[in-house]
Image (cartoon, helix red, strand yellow):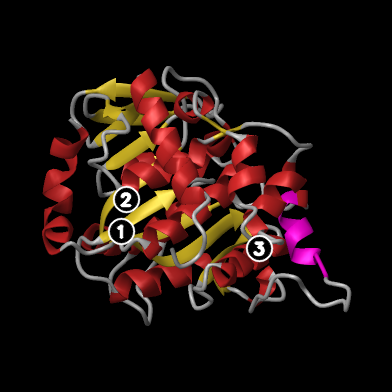
Amino acid sequence: MLRRFLLCLCCAVAAAGAPVPVLFDTDMGNDIDDALALAMLHSLESRGEAKLLAVTLTKDHPHAAVYVDLVNHFYGRPRIPVGVVRDGKTPEASPMISAPVERRDTAGRPVYPRRLASGRDADEAVQLLRRILAAADDRSVVFVQVGFSTNLARLLASTPDAASRLGGRDLVARKARLLSIMAGAFPGKPEYNVRVDVPSARTVFDEWPTPIIVSGFEIGREILYPAASIERDFAYVLHHPVADAYRAYRKMPYDRTTWDLTSVLVAVRPDGEYFSLSATGRVRVDDDGTTHFAPGAGSHRYLTADAAQRAKALAAMVELASQPPGH
């Protein structure tokens, strides 16, 4: 059972009733599920279930950080730090982030307040991650990675600095307790998040020092976020940055896969019975981005879900993603 597997990891936090400290690493702008996943994290924080420590970006476009920053402002958390990848992947522009970032009112002012004018004004991701980890309690932080593995691989390779005397792998081993990652496919085939940066994905699966829960391509593919929710549940405000992004990503109406939302859900609510787990083992990454799972020794598991679990997960994800700020 998922609860039994994570009990040893979560007992201290759960016993205290404390929110789950989350570091969210995303390729915001490449698909709309990233924006919905960020909205979920804000709602989980409003409910006292999570604490969003920082958001780091693996999409190397200046609007990615600005979009995250304005979403954080919209949900009333403008001080959440945002870190960006340098010399990263997918530098292409994306309408889903550019439309909200560039939206202006009749006076020419940005519709959505933000602190960052460009991703160039944000912290570098690995330096930010090291600072946040150094200040965290031991074995407390849950990483949620829903983009490429670039930042986390670089974090593992990082050297001691002013934030911590520990190297990256030792710092992660001391401060983190779980990585929830949307990557791969089971059974294996090339998957986008892995394929775009295969060396980094291989590094993370080979060297990450905590248990890893993987939400494969097949999980989110079978759970579709309904366009009807965008039109109905986000209408409590005239301008909503997540709904605006959803409409800009693709011509409406469309239902969209929930890949990244599943990784958030299992990270913060491990005992919610939304999913089941494979046996323990290890994930191996081929040169073409195909993932293979070998049961046995190891601390990796991947999600599975039956029809009832998929329905329960979708209901929870829609409720959380569409929850108004402060509720």
The amino acid marked with disc number 1 is: Glu
Q: Residue at x 30, y 58 (%)?
A: 49
In the displayed structure, 33 sits above or below 312; it is below
Question: For mark 2, what is the residue?
Answer: 268
State the residue lying farthest toward the bottom: 162
Label 3 residue SS: helix
In the displayed structure, 136 sits above or below 3; it is below
Question: For mark 1, what is the residue?
Answer: 49
Indicate which label's residue lies in the foreground, 2 or 1.
1
Q: Nearer the viewer, residue 311 or 290?
A: 311
Q: Which quadrant is the N terminus positioned in?
A: top left
* Between discs 3 and 1, the one toward the N terminus: 1
Per the model, the C-alpha gap separating discs 3 and 2 is 23 Å
Q: Nearer the viewer, residue 313 or 10?
A: 313
Is residue 83 visible in this depiction of the protein? yes
> Which mark is on residue 67?
3
Asked if marks 3 and 2 touch (Cβ < 8 Å), the reply is no
Query: x, y percentage for residue 192?
Result: 58, 34
- The segment highlighted magenta reads 96-104
Asked if marks 3 and 1 touch (Cβ < 8 Å), the reply is no
Is residue 94 visible in this depiction of the protein? no
* Between discs 3 and 2, the one toward the N terminus: 3
